[in-house]
């Protein structure tokens, strides 16, 4: 990486580290009463549901980004540690058996390189996405690491790997762009962007085919391109087959309303426009700054988004929740697509959901599921949701990276 680029990334990392430290230093939830046997916190949740504080930095959390239920009362957490390489860990969170006891964590694996993605594979193993490697392990008391895909690009502005399995068992992986807007050290923006060229282009979502007796890598190829940073990936079911959705973290303008974050449907070979084509607040294509007069951004020139989301909400995860198999087991998010809006502007700092139509397409306006996360001294810190999962009971589990917490959203009056 050229020297000037390294200096820019170092400056960005230092700023992020300061923000993370300050957020942690100030992060304190006022608790009052109980929610599912945990201390209750003041957040806006669906009617009849409440939010409980399960774990904090005092229980070993440093920068949690993903959470996954592996067994009743057991969750695995991908904890980045910070933005430095090899400071991450895979943690296990064990819920207490007796009311009033605290949840406890233990380290399953350490010195990981910015772990982010966490998924249960069709082989029953847990897959972990580090910056440069995808590996798996059986669910057990100890990790039995097996590298599945190695030598993925781990440099640049977007090294994190989001992962999701399709219904056919294929694994889809985010290879984010190395830069914000394809600017080189001279602040030039060549066209075509070099990051999208060559045998392993960046700014893409890749499809990995695993097979054979050992379920090893058979092929790895780009599935869709022109995607700056795909930290949200999820499948929905439709009458014509599964559909893959991507939450796009768009270019970093300082404008309050530009450019829009996007919800894209990814199809084989689709190009979604980055870096030269972005979206305005209504989802209409616009030429990105630096490319004026050098390109056109009509909807016929690239695949436009299905939805435009508010600028700077920073979508960090998508999660499809299946419909309930019985009315008594329905939850507010049953049969919906959940989106984690991490945010650094006021439209973010929340978890929202969308209706899925008969074709498996998200429609309508975003509905708040967990919100009211504005900072209020002595009550709560500014919300920073990074990852979610829904457990076997239908409860929503949340990890906050900067606040170093695990939260649960559960029905009122019910205990674990």
Image (cartoon, rainbow, N blue to C red):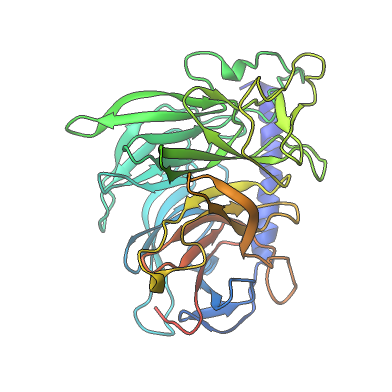
Q: Is residue 4 left or right of residue 59?
A: right
Q: Name the quadrant of the N terminus.
A: top right
Quick check: 261 above or below 346? above
Residue 77 in picture, x, y percent from top left: 43, 56
Q: Name the quadrant of the C terminus.
A: bottom left
Query: Would residue 257 be visible to someone looking at this image?
Result: yes
Name the residue at 56% across, 61% down. Answer: 404
Q: Is residue 36 left or right of residue 260?
A: left
Residue 315 in picture, x, y percent from top left: 61, 47
Number of marks present in the image shown: 0
Name the residue at 44% across, 61% down. Answer: 390
Judging depth in this view, the residue of 117 and 346 nearest the camera is 346
Quick check: 61 above or below 231? below
The picture quadrant where one finds residue 96 is bottom left
Judging depth in this view, the residue of 358 and 40 nearest the camera is 358
Query: Would residue 130 be visible to someone looking at this image?
Result: no
Name the residue at 75% across, 37% down. Answer: 259
Judging depth in this view, the residue of 281 and 387 nearest the camera is 281
Residue 177 in picture, x, y percent from top left: 59, 29
Quick check: 301 above or below 339? above
Residue 214 in picture, x, y percent from top left: 20, 34
């Amino acid at each position: 990486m050229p020297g000037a680029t390294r200096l820019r990334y170092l400056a960005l990392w230092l700023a992020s580290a300061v923000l993370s430290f300050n957020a942690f230093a100030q992060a304190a939830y006022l608790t009052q009463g109980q929610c599912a046997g945990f201390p209750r916190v003041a957040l806006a949740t669906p009617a009849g549901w409440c939010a409980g504080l399960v774990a904090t930095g005092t229980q070993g959390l440093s920068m949690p980004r993903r959470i996954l239920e592996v067994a009743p009362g057991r969750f695995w957490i991908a904890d980045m540690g910070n933005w430095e390489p090899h400071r991450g860990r895979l943690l296990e969170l064990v819920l207490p058996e007796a009311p009033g006891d605290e949840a406890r964590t233990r380290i399953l694996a350490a010195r990981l390189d910015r772990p982010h993605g966490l998924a249960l594979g069709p082989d029953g193993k847990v897959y972990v996405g580090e910056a440069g490697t995808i590996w798996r392990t059986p669910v057990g008391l100890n990790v039995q690491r097996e590298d599945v895909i190695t030598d993925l690009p781990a440099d640049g502005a977007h090294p994190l790997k989001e992962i999701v399995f399709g219904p056919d068992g294929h694994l889809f992986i985010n290879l984010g762009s190395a830069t914000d807007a394809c600017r080189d050290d001279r602040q030039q923006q060549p066209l075509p962007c070099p990051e999208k060229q060559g045998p392993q282009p960046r700014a893409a979502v890749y499809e990995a085919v695993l097979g054979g007796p050992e379920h090893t890598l058979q092929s790895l190829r780009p599935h869709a391109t022109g995607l700056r940073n795909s930290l949200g990936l999820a499948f929905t079911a439709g009458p014509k087959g599964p559909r893959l959705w991507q939450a796009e973290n768009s270019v970093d303008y300082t404008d309050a309303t530009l450019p829009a974050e996007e919800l894209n449907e990814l199809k084989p070979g689709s190009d979604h426009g980055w870096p030269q084509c972005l979206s305005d607040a209504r989802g209409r294509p616009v030429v990105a700054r630096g490319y004026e007069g050098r390109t056109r951004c009509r909807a016929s020139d690239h695949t436009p988004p299905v939805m435009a989301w508010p600028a700077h909400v920073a979508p960090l995860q998508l999660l499809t929740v299946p419909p309930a198999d019985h009315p008594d087991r329905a939850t507010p998010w049953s049969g919906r697509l959940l989106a984690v809006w991490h945010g650094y502007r006021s439209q973010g700092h929340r978890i929202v959901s969308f209706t899925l139509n008969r074709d498996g397409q998200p429609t309508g306006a975003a509905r708040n599921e967990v919100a009211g996360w504005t900072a209020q001294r002595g009550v709560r810190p500014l919300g920073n949701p990074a990852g979610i999962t829904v457990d076997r009971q239908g409860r929503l589990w949340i990890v906050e990276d900067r606040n170093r917490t695990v939260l649960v959203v559960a029905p009122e009056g019910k205990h674990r």
